[in-house]
């Protein structure tokens, strides 16, 4: 009896899914003829994507609500596209330009899925509150090394600390590795000057735990952000909570800041151990020098990485985080 009822419920669920799919199919086929473009092809950049809806910024700086021709692929925030006007303020994306770089994460099939395109920098935010997760910074650093873009580390909310120097000391090994590090507070505009310079003319994706202040920082750096949010919402007719979707904001002097929904949206995909350790730039001088070629830098004798940790050449916390990440990939 229980079994039968369950299977009826399953049938109901399958029926519901099929109905949804059919509705979607009808909607799509209603849509396609409308996507017959009238305007000439133009270049644009994807500012935000909500499902099938894109806000594309034109070269004249206007936002156009675009749908995507089904053969185009999946444009994401930061993508350069070709679009054509179909009505006032409405367009269709007809081509996706090749990406120079992309930040991706594995989807449910463990296939890489792009989150943002054409970034030139990864800006990793941390703060005293929420308490920094041990391995997260290193995970983002591995991602940046793999993409081949620079990583900047920003310690935000310095205003909440009575002893900022003690907090900063916990991260002192990063500047020693050549990662530029900034200490900021959105409540102290002067603290943002150096970061502002480092962001100019770059396409920076801001990443980090939820609540570290990614959106607040962008808002402080771009005082007209409210207007931009308004424009994006108008263009898509959807959504005001921009941090639920990766969103691109143009910098006045050139470049852009991309706000991401934080750590929820990111993890490393399937990586070989060799690829993971190559993402630790401090390990590189020692790779290939362990006694065993497949050394995990754990209990093995004559491990060059552990020897470097013993002399202080590699920070012990980096090796701990490597081992943690090794278990997750
Ligand atoms: N004291 C202090 N609070 C800050 C600072 N920056 C941000 N906050 C506060 O921290 C909270 C979270 O800020 P958000 O900007 O929403 O954080 P986020 O990183 O965008 O978070 P998600 O969108 O959830 O990933 C808000 O209440 C901000 O007001 C800062 O420099 N100092
Ligand atoms: Mg946010
Ligand atoms: Zn080793």
Image (tube, rainbow, N blue to C red):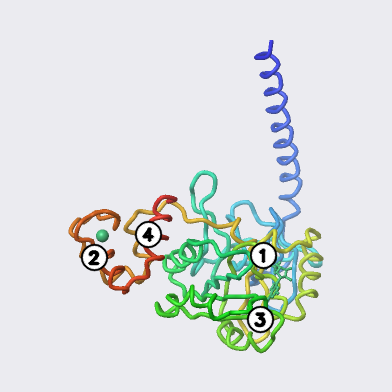
Q: Which residue is mark 2?
A: 304
225 displayed left or right of 199: right
Q: Residues within 10 Å of mark 4 (few under 14, many from 20)?
A: many
* Quadrant location, the N terminus: top right
Q: CA distance from mark 4 to mark 1?
A: 27 Å
Q: Which of the two discs, 3 and 2, sits closer to the camera? A: 2
Q: CA distance from mark 4 to mark 3?
A: 33 Å
The residue positioned 32% from the left and 73% from the top of the image is 312
249 displayed left or right of 131: right
Q: Is residue 131 above or below residue 11?
A: below
Q: Are marks 3 and 2 in contact (CB under 8 Å)?
A: no
148 displayed left or right of 35: left
Dot 4 or dot 3: first in sequence order is 3
Q: Is residue 24 above or below residue 82?
A: above
Instruction: Assign a secondary structure to mark 2.
Output: helix
Dot 2 or dot 4: first in sequence order is 4
Q: Which residue is mark 4?
A: 276
Q: Find residue 329 and report its horizontal and vertical position in percent.
A: 42, 51
Write down which quadrant ligand 3 falls in.
bottom left
The residue positioned 75% from the left and 67% from the top of the image is 64
Q: CA distance from mark 1 to mark 2?
A: 38 Å
Q: Which residue is mark 1?
A: 211
Q: Find residue 137 and report its horizontal and vertical position in percent.
A: 50, 66
């Amino acid at each position: 009896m229980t079994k039968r009822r369950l299977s009826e419920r399953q049938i109901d669920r399958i029926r519901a899914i099929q109905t949804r799919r059919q509705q979607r199919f009808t909607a799509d086929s209603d849509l396609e003829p409308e996507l017959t473009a009238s305007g000439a092809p133009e270049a644009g950049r994807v500012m935000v994507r909500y499902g099938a809806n894109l806000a594309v910024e034109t070269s004249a700086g206007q936002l156009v609500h675009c749908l995507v021709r089904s053969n185009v692929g999946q444009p994401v925030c930061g993508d350069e596209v070709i679009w054509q006007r179909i009505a006032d303020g409405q367009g269709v994306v007809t081509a996706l330009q090749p990406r120079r770089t992309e930040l991706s994460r594995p989807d449910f099939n463990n296939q890489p899925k792009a989150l943002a395109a054409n970034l030139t920098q990864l800006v990793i935010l941390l703060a005293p509150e929420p308490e920094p997760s041990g391995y997260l910074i290193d995970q983002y650093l591995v991602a940046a090394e793999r993409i081949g873009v620079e990583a900047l580390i920003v310690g935000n909310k310095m205003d909440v600390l009575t002893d900022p120097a003690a907090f900063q000391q916990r991260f002192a090994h990063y500047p020693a590795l050549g990662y530029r590090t900034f200490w900021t507070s959105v409540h102290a505009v002067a603290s943002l000057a150096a970061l502002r310079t480092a962001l100019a003319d770059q396409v920076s994706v801001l990443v980090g735990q939820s609540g570290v202040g990614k959106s607040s920082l962008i808002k402080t750096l771009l005082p007209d952000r409210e207007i931009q949010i308004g424009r994006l919402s108008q263009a898509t007719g959807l959504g005001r909570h921009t941090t639920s979707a990766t969103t691109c904001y143009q910098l006045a002097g050139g470049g852009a800041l991309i706000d991401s929904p934080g750590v929820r949206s990111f993890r490393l995909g399937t990586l070989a151990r060799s690829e993971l350790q190559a993402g630790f730039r401090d390990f590189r001088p020692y790779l290939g020098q362990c006694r065993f070629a497949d050394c995990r830098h754990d209990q093995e004798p004559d491990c060059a990485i552990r020897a470097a940790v013993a002399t202080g050449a590699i920070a012990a916390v980096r090796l701990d985080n490597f081992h943690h990440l090794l278990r997750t990939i």
